[in-house]
Amino acid sequence: MISKKMQEAVANSSAIRAMFLEGKEMAAKVGVENVYDFSLGNPMTPVPAAYNQAIIDAVENENSLELHGYMDNAGYPETRKTVADNLNKRFGTEFEGKHIVMTVGAAGALNVVFKTILDPGDEVLALAPYFGEYRGYVANHQGILKEVTPDIETFQPDFHDFEQKITEKTRAVIINNPVNPTGVIYSEETIQKMAAILEKKEKEYGREIFMVSDEPYRELVYDGNQVPFLTKYYDNTFVTYSFSKSLSIPGERIGYIAVCPQMADCEQVCSGLSVANRMLGFVNAPSLMQKALVKAIDSTTDVAYYDRNRKLIYDKLTALGFECVKPQGAFYLFIKSPDAEEKKFVEEAKKYHILMVGGTTFACPGFVRLAYCVSYEMIERSLPAFEKLAKAYGLAGEK
């Protein structure tokens, strides 16, 4: 018999994954070409050729025992330096290799950070809507997650609610930028306001409150938008990153933590992260992927591919009468449910073989998420189904 905690976790396991499996069952019945699965945020673009070649070069040219062996828990020194230099070049920061810890993706990075900074009962604020796995990551380390209400019109945070939710138990704020599920970017103005509030609260309570920035979609931005780099605005910041989306390698589980050099007790914090990496059982990030990054750190995915999808699905669905904020980044569309009960809307969409995820999964009921990291052709095939769905709800639609 598994533990009671795990029984609860299984019962509340990812709705996104469940939808993905349901899509496969539906495809077996009606044909894969007739199922429009927008449930899973799985990258669609090819892995950059330079990254593939870097992997081949490492296998062919590196000493095999060193290539596949252990290294420092924080990662290869040359990889950490490569990441630090790349960030400095792009964002005008002042990282050194010692400020970088290589991790098993962004999920591993977040767990390492929380293991390092949380004591039992510490609170972590999450800006709704947010990636639902944050609940588990915080609970893993005996923390308590509290939700901050969004401004539904813009999906920027409600600053009054943000300030009210900060207490003497608050240890961290987790920020996802660009945001999964809305595609919104938290602007420089938003970050500056949050930083000012946190600095005031740090003085009031006499303890550090950390910003933990989760940025797997940082490179997936559109229309000339930019994602503010948080260490430039707030000293007590961790930036956690995954190459899953920027290089289309989610299965390789490679990411990093960047620690602001001006963070309080920075040296001790970096040591703590390295030890936490080992204590959590990761030991170190995948060695082959680290070696490949040294040569291919500047590789990027085809953002234009996602932008083309974004324009098609946003323009068509809003023309049909659906309401949503226009995504500035990532590859998600967050639509207001025309049914007060979003679950009914999700079920109605299935009648037309459209699969999407309810906003309750992201702590924002009344909305649904569509992941448009799919083929352009699938979006085109889905449009008649969306038109039928719009008519079922009496939306205005195209003339």
Image: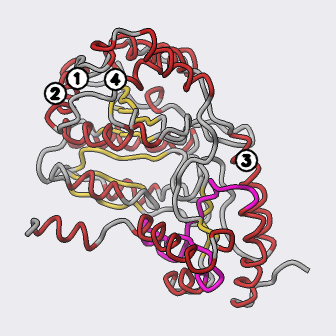
In this rendered view, identify the residue nearer to me: 152 or 5: 5
Q: CA distance from mark 1 to mark 3?
A: 37 Å
Numbered badge on residue 73: 1
* Label 4 residue SS: helix
Residue at label 3?
Answer: 307
333 magenta-colored: no
Numbered badge on residue 275: 2
In this rendered view, identify the residue nearer to me: 157 or 378: 378
Q: CA distance from mark 1 to mark 4?
A: 11 Å
Numbered badge on residue 287: 4
Q: Earlier in the sequence, mark 3 or mark 4?
A: 4
Determine whether label 1 and label 2 are within 8 Å by CB: yes
In this rendered view, identify the residue nearer to me: 5 or 166: 5
Numbered badge on residue 259: none
Residue 356: percent from left, percent from top: 56, 71
- What's the amino acid at mark 2? Val
Which residues fall within the magenta stretch?
349-377
Q: Earlier in the sequence, mark 1 or mark 3?
A: 1
Quadrant assignment for the N terminus: bottom left
